[in-house]
């Protein structure tokens, strides 16, 4: 994909840099692709080295807000504000930032409905809120307005990847690779290979794109690279390499919430409790949200500070429930997974039933990706509905994922359903020292299969 920093599009007295289209295209970076991985925030694409004329920061935000108060119908002002909040959403993953970005993009399109940049940015703001169907409609409008536009094909591929439509995503990305080549196509194909369980190829493509010296000028891009390489290293079973990449990302950027969260969780799982607690405490104070409270709660629970953990869990639950009740569908799966984790011991059956309802709603209203089927499978498993759980987890694993947590869940589900051979096969693919999964899940699976092995030995 090319970035035409100098080309301008005019509409009367309004003139908008076309580069805004492309700057907006990948700015959602670490959050836009939450569908690729069931776990938390998923992935996303790199932030291309931006045209400095299109970038604003916190120091100049006030200037543009003042301009907006004076001229709310000025496209240049709207484009800068929309871009700012979309870029900040990429870093913070806050839905409020996505919603604010959506507001400015919508106002932009009300003035210039044929704007490619405005519609592309709006689509990504919607993807960040998990409103994929709406985003896809805007992407198709971009194609109608500008047939063959690389940015439109990238956008459509991104949405299909979020929805779990891997073949459609692959077609779009292959189009990009054959037409334009470059790092944008590489990192998108890397995310596709990751979704299919080819982690080594995903790592190689990502590292190749990240090592390209023509792209390393952007701090956001470098931070994204380090975080992604850490995430894939963890899937490859190298917790030491993952920690190294996450640490570099955290050291490079104070606002790297994803890398900080990943590093804190990883250190806690590896028993480095002092550094993990310090990092997660700072993160939860700087960026208070359910995911960070839960991670900090887990760290407290790991050292038997149960009252502190419970308080954080309850606060996270209340926030997620409130968000879902007011229509924030982006937290549906997160809340379902929280209820299925049994972090709060009271009323487990009630929470499991509510989690099943949310998992079904996620599939119906949000997306039909592999992660949605995995959450549904786990909900059925928790409720003792093993046949339904087996059907759902088979669908979740059908794309080829070898994520250790997914394999362990599949192994436990098939074991409960009576397919001990398949269960043992999946369990055997998981490194017993992996830090990529919660210790509670690994321990439960280990006990299950050790007892199963002991039973077979006693009956031999």
Image (spheres, rainbow, N blue to C red):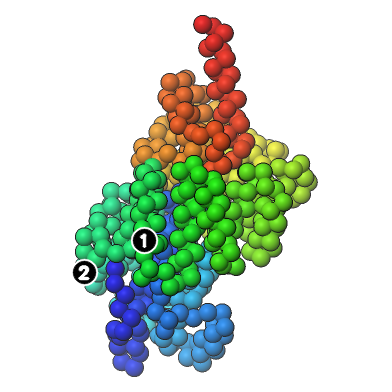
Measure the C-alpha gap from mark 2 to mark 1.
Answer: 27 Å
Q: Nearer the viewer, residue 445 or 324?
A: 445
Question: Can I make out residue 161 in this image?
Answer: no
Question: Can I make out residue 237 in this image?
Answer: yes
Quadrant occupied by the N terminus: bottom left
Q: Nearer the viewer, residue 158 or 212?
A: 212
Q: Position of residue 310 (x, y in %)?
A: 73, 46
Q: Is residue 152 above or below residue 195?
A: below
Element type at mark 2: loop
| Residue occupying image coordinates x 48% and y 29% | 427
Q: Position of residue 237 (x, y in %)?
A: 49, 41
Disc 1 packing (10 Å; few <14; some 14–19; many ≥20): many
Q: Nearer the viewer, residue 324 or 378?
A: 378
Q: Position of residue 322 (x, y in %)?
A: 62, 56
- Relative to 91, is 10 on the left or the right? left
Q: Nearer the viewer, residue 284 or 124?
A: 284
Q: Is residue 210 above or below residue 200?
A: below
Label 2 vs 1, first from the N-terminus:
2
| Residue occupying image coordinates x 57% and y 15% | 454
Q: Is residue 375 above or below residue 192?
A: above
| Residue occupying image coordinates x 53% and y 79% | 57
Q: Are marks 2 and 1 in contact (CB under 8 Å)?
A: no
- Relative to 5, is 236 on the left or the right? right
Q: Is residue 133 above or below residue 89?
A: above
Mark linked to residue 399: none
Disc 2 packing (10 Å; few <14; some 14–19; many ≥20): few
Mark linked to residue 147: 2
Label 1 belongs to which residue?
209
Q: Position of residue 199 (x, y in %)?
A: 40, 45
């Amino acid at each position: 994909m090319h970035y035409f920093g100098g080309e301008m599009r005019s509409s009367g007295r309004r003139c908008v840099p076309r580069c805004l289209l492309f700057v907006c295209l990948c700015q959602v970076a670490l959050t836009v692709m939450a569908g690729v991985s069931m776990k938390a925030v998923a992935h996303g694409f790199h932030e291309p080295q931006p045209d400095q004329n299109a970038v604003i920061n916190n120091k100049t935000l006030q200037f543009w807000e003042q301009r907006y108060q004076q001229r709310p119908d000025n496209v240049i002002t709207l484009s800068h504000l929309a871009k700012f909040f979309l870029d900040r959403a990429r870093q913070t993953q806050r839905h409020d930032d996505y919603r604010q970005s959506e507001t400015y993009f919508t106002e932009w399109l009300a003035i210039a409905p044929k704007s490619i940049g405005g519609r592309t940015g709006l689509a990504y703001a919607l993807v960040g809120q998990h409103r994929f169907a709406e985003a896809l409609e805007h992407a198709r409008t971009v194609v109608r307005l500008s047939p063959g536009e690389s940015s439109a094909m990238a956008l459509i591929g991104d949405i299909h990847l979020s929805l779990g439509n891997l073949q459609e995503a692959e077609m779009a990305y292959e189009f990009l690779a054959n037409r334009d080549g470059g790092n944008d196509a590489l990192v998108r194909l890397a995310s596709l290979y990751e979704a299919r369980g080819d982690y080594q190829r995903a790592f190689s493509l990502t590292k190749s794109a990240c090592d390209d010296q023509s792209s390393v000028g952007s701090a956001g891009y470098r931070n994204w690279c380090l975080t992604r390489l850490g995430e894939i290293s963890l899937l490859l079973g190298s917790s030491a390499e993952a920690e190294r990449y996450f640490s570099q990302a955290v050291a490079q950027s104070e606002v790297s919430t994803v890398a900080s969260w990943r590093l804190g969780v990883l250190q806690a799982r590896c028993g480095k409790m002092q550094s993990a607690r310090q990092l997660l405490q700072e993160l939860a104070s700087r960026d208070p949200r359910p995911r960070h409270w839960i991670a900090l709660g887990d760290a407290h629970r790991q050292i038997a500070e149960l009252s502190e953990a419970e308080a954080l869990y309850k606060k996270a639950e209340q926030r997620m429930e409130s968000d879902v009740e007011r229509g924030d569908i982006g937290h549906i799966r997160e809340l379902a997974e929280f209820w299925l984790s049994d972090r709060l011991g009271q009323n487990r059956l009630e929470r499991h039933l509510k989690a099943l309802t949310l998992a079904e709603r996620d599939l119906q209203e949000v997306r039909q990706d592999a992660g949605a089927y995995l959450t549904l499978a786990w909900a059925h498993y928790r409720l003792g509905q093993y046949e339904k759980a087996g059907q759902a987890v088979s669908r979740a694993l059908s794309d080829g994922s070898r994520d250790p947590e997914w394999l362990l869940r599949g192994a436990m589900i098939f074991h409960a359903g009576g397919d001990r051979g398949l269960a043992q096969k999946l369990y055997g693919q998981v490194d017993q020292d992996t830090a990529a999964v919660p210790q509670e899940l690994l321990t439960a699976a280990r006990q299950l299969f050790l007892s199963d092995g002991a039973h077979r030995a006693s009956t031999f």
